[in-house]
Image: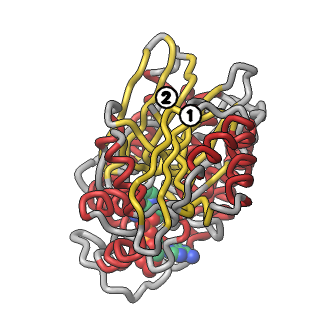
Amino acid sequence: MDNIVKVGLLGLGTVGSGVFKTLSNFDNVEVTKISVSNINKKRNIEGLSQEILTTDSMSIVNNSDIDIIVEVIGGINPAFDLITTAIKNKKHIVTANKELIAKHGEEIFELAKKFNVSVLYEAAVAGGIPIIMPIKMALAGNKISKIAGILNGTTNFILTKMTNEKADFEPILKEAQELGYAEADPTGDIQGYDAAYKIAILASLAFGKRIDSSLIYREGIDNISAVDIEYADDMGYKIKLIALAQITENDKVDVRVHPMFVSKKLPIAYIDGVLNAIYLKGHPVGEVMFSGPGAGEFPTASSVVGDILALAEEIPYTDNPLPMLKCKHEEKAEQLDIKHTENKYYIRVSAQNTPGVIGDLGCICGRNKINLSSIFQKGILADGSARVVLLTEPSKEEAVQKAVEEMNAHSQVKQVMNVIRVMD
Ligand SMILES: NC(=O)c1ccc[n+]([C@@H]2O[C@H](COP(=O)([O-])OP(=O)(O)OC[C@H]3O[C@@H](n4cnc5c(N)ncnc54)[C@H](OP(=O)(O)O)[C@@H]3O)[C@@H](O)[C@H]2O)c1
């Protein structure tokens, strides 16, 4: 029997190159065809023969000699058509495409079930950190109740640099773009879309219910300033973009992405730079945290190649490889609206430096049933205005939104400058 498993690679960019180079160390797998967008591009890849390159990805997914299709092009089109065609041709799929899995996972997994093939996507969440297979296999006996992740390296790099250099967002974003850590159009990272796709995937797996990524509440990091970071530090916190997913008492699913004050008592507060981390709470395991490189050529290739080899070990012997890694859940999650969540909050207010303002802000909170753990004034600015900082006890989001509205309407308040949820 020919036990060499044939791979068709769609895409030879950052991840594709790492996959090709890493696979050259294994003799049970052979990359027989690779599709690219520009066939004339100079590629310094040892052992790459120009003959196996094509711009016709469809010819690869329709090639009857190929067993596994590895999609590392990214985006929705043509990735969706290519993957669904490959599945109909009974090919197993390995992809790093979080956007595609988060938005079209349901159609893809239904189709994969119908044609009895596997779709593996370890690299789609947190690059080199093994998290999909651990949730599906090693942690399969758990009831997972909470996940909190730092799932985007670009935003973590920016927030870490803002913290270390006491700098504001804009100049650090520019520096990150110059260093190649942020894209020319950074919207997907900065506004939390990328982290939202990833937490949608993780929450679906962990809770065994389908999550609609378009319903995930999302706030970016562009409203975070050096002042917020300084106050966070004074109060024992660091600011991180957190992707959160938790099961509520009435079995709803609370999934969101937004910046948080993270207590310095928590290990996740120390995940800095481009690193990613995933904290997970479950029964019977308790609390676990995974951390490591969330992106990059070789860390991401590590996850893609792990999926390829897992399939390659079994394909020669069975028509049903890796049954535990197949998607089994079909029920849709009931997703909690952000206004029904409960959090602690940091609220920064710019107010006139007049007697009674702090008292009035306290009264607004009291009227809205928000208990404060502290309220204080942080100096007077050159224009005579005062910075007032409030820290609340756990409070209803709806009540906090109403209180913020009332604060903004107060004659002595210039503006509520920021509201950031707190994780202790
Ligand atoms: N980069 C990371 O660190 C990382 C981490 C985790 C997950 N991912 C995911 O991995 C995927 C790939 O990311 P990447 O960073 O490797 O992207 P990339 O560097 O932009 O590479 C994309 C590759 O796809 C090829 N391509 C583009 N359109 C094509 C088409 N229509 N037909 C055939 N080939 C086409 C490009 O060809 P040319 O080479 O000719 O331009 C290039 O080789 C994305 O889904 C991304 O989200 C990336």
Number of numbered markers: 2
Q: Residues within 10 Å of mark 1 (few under 14, many from 20)?
A: some
Residue 372 — which label?
A: 1
Q: Quadrant of the C terminus?
A: top left
- Visible in this render: residue 393? yes
Q: Where 69 falls versus 28 (above or below)?
A: below
Mark 2 and mark 1: Cα distance apart in space: 38 Å
Residue 365 position by quadrant: top right
Decide if residue 256 is on the left or right side of residue 299.
right
**Residue 149: x percent and y percent?**
46, 41
Decide if residue 179 is on the left or right side of residue 60.
left
- In the picture of the structure, the residue carrying the numbered disc 2 is 135
Amino acid type, residue under disc 2 in the picture: Ile
Residue at image point 38% right, 25% down: 288
Amino acid type, residue under disc 1 in the picture: Leu
**Residue 31: x percent and y percent?**
38, 60
Mark 2 C-beta closer than 8 Å to ligand 1: no
Residue 254 position by quadrant: top right
**Viewer-nearest of discs 2 and 1:** 1
Secondary structure of residue under mark 2? helix
Residue nearest the observer in this picture, 185 or 219 = 219
Q: Which label's residue is closer to the chain start, 2 or 1?
A: 2
Q: Where 98 falls versus 168 (above or below)?
A: above
Residue at image point 46% right, 45% down: 376
- Visible in this render: residue 197? no
Secondary structure of residue under mark 1? strand
